[in-house]
Image (cartoon, rainbow, N blue to C red):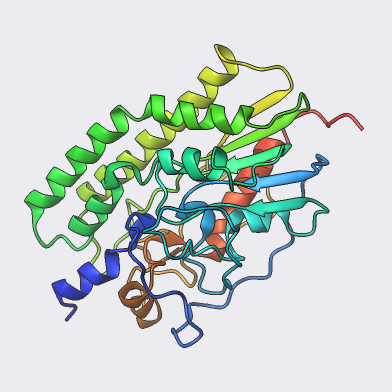
Amino acid sequence: MIQVGTLIIATLGILGLSHQALAAPSAEVAQGPTLVARAPIDIKRKYKRYVALGDSYSAGPGNEAGGEIKDAGIKHPPEVTNCYVTDGGWPNQLQTGKNWQFQFSACTGYNTTDIKKYQIDGAASKFENPDLVTLTLGGNNKEAFLNVVLKCPYGVLPKPCTEAINAARETIEGIGPEIQQTVLAARDKNRNGGPRTVVVMGYPTFYQEDGRIIDCISPARREEINALVTSLNEKLKGVTETINGEDSDEGVDVLFADPNNPKIGNPDEDASFDNHRFCERKERAFFAGWPDSSRYLFRAAFTIGVFHPTKDGHYVMAAAAQNQIATLDPLPE
């Protein structure tokens, strides 16, 4: 039987919300199912410099087959000891095979303010006039999602779960202005009049609501937690629409990419989180950490990757970004 203390250890790094140092992925950790070979993400637009910002959902600590990438060299808060950036993170998959200058500045544990302060505005941010910027943000604010996944997934106590969900709703409700400030900074910082594309990536919902495996939480709880993710995604999308409307800037495209949209314009029939979320018994999970098998259970207990997309999941996110970029006109030569 899984002990409650073990579950707490397992979830300390969920969403990268804790700045505490956890065990990095190790070759000794049992691995998940073999990944399907994937073609590189095809981008028709010719970018020159790409900067990837954001939190753990860009950094990629859930990649069971991803090696860690050397730290980007930007200044971090003193409590951050490892950003857990991996080569399976969707920004790296997005740029693979391209002749772009690539700066991977995302860091596990960063909230919206951290991203602006350290990854964009910081003196050592290396945010040097990119023409493509991507970011994930909002999931770490006030540790809202951390508290939800600490107190809800195994259904030990219903009241703390309900309280955590209500607190997360309140956080998300007021998060819009802070997100907008950070996205505007990503749009405007060090821009020398040239074109720039900013892609704001949403978060994948955790649960398959109509699936059922042993130890999965109730359908009602799955719906509530998924609704929180959807609500945050709506805030992110709303910010991009506001910026493109009231605060538009000629030459800049600010896009929202939804990783939950199965029609992402990719020929791979499995390029979707559908049928690969928690509460399903499938050959390949697109999230790390749910005990579908002992292979994932060990990752849940001893690494920061729990409740993060696997390399397959990050491929879906890269393809979602690709789909949005494909809607833009070609850049001038």
Q: Which residue lies at the image location 80% right of the left edge and 44% below the top edge?
A: 48
Q: Taking 169 as reference, is 41 above or below it?
A: below
Q: Position of residue 231 (x, y in %)?
A: 35, 34
Q: Taking 328 as reference, is 305 above or below it?
A: below
Which is nearer the eye, 122 or 90?
Answer: 122
Q: Taking 52 as reference, is 4 above or below it?
A: below
In the image: residue 327, left or right of residue 33: right
Look at the image and tell me in which quarter the C terminus lies. top right
Which is nearer the eye, 258 or 100?
Answer: 100
Q: Quadrant of residue 218?
A: bottom left
In the image: residue 109, left or right of residue 256: left
Q: Position of residue 53 (x, y in %)?
A: 56, 46
Look at the image and tell me in which quarter the N terminus lies. bottom left
In the image: residue 298, left or right of residue 133: left
Residue lying farthest bottom? 28
Residue lying farthest top? 246
Q: Quadrant of residue 128?
A: top right
Q: Is residue 236 visible?
A: yes
Q: Which residue lies at the image location 44% right of the left edge and 74% below the top edge?
A: 24
Q: Quadrant of residue 195?
A: top right
Q: Position of residue 277 (x, y in %)?
A: 41, 58
In the image: residue 25, left or right of residue 195: left
Q: Is residue 270 visible?
A: no
Q: Which residue lies at the image location 55% right of the left edge and 11% below the top edge?
A: 246
Q: Position of residue 107 (x, y in %)?
A: 49, 55
Residue lying farthest front? 123
